[in-house]
Image (cartoon, grey):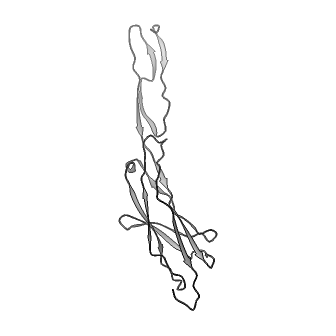
Amino acid sequence: GLPNGATYAVTEDGAAGWTQTNQTNATGSIRANDTAEAAFENTYSTSGSVTLTAEKRYLGADIEEGMFAFQVTDSDGTVIRQAYADPEDGHIVFDPIEYGQTDAGQTYVYYISEIPGDLEQVGRHRLHQHQAVQPDGHQDGGRQRGRQEQGLRLHNQALDAGRRG
C-alpha cells in the first residue's frame, strides 16, 4: 500500500464529445489504513451539419448570376434553404443544416427543387430530388455524419426566343 500521508492526483483523459461536468476528490492525501475515492461526472453532447448540393447545367447558353434559384424543403413542405446556381460551374450549395444531440438516430428527409423563374425561353424542371440525412452522434469523435443520396443534376436547353418549349 501507500505510506501514511501519501498525496494523490487523479486526472481523466478527455474523449471526443464528452465534457467533464463535475469531479470529487480528484486530489488529496491518504491516511494510514484508509481508502480514498475519486469520482468524475461527464456529459456527452455532439453536433454536426450536412451541406446539400446540386448541379445545374444550362445547355446552349451561359448561366447568369441569379438566373436559376433552388430551394430545400423538409418533409412537411417547409422551405428551409434557398440558393442560386453558380454562374461559373452551375453548382448549387445550400447553407449547412445543423444537428444536435437530440437529432442522433433520426432520419430527416429533404427535397431539392428548382424555383420557377420568369425566363420564358427556358423550360423549368418541376421535379424534386429526395435527400435522406441520418445524423449519427454515437462513438463518432463528437461529429455527426450525414448520409445523403446522389446529388441532383438538372439540365435545360436554351430555346430560340421565337419558339416556346
Find the residue positioned furthest to the left: 76
Depicted 83 relative to depicted 37: above or below: below
Place of residue 42 in the rendered image (x, y in percent of width and height, measured from the top left): 41, 34
User: Which residue: 48% across, 53% down?
Assistant: 49
Q: How many marks?
A: 0
Which corner quadrant holds the N terminus? top left
Place of residue 92 in the rendered image (x, y in percent of width and height, measured from the top left): 55, 66
Place of residue 59 in the rendered image (x, y in percent of width and height, measured from the top left): 60, 77
Front residue (pair 56, 100): 56
Front residue (pair 11, 108): 108
User: Which residue: 44% across, 40% down?
Assistant: 139
Depicted 131 relative to depicted 123: above or below: above
User: Which residue: 42% across, 53% down?
Assistant: 134
Find the residue positioned furthest to the bottom: 162
Q: In the shown orientation, is residue 106 left or right of residue 157? A: left
Depicted 19 relative to depicted 5: above or below: below
The image quadrant of residue 122 is bottom right
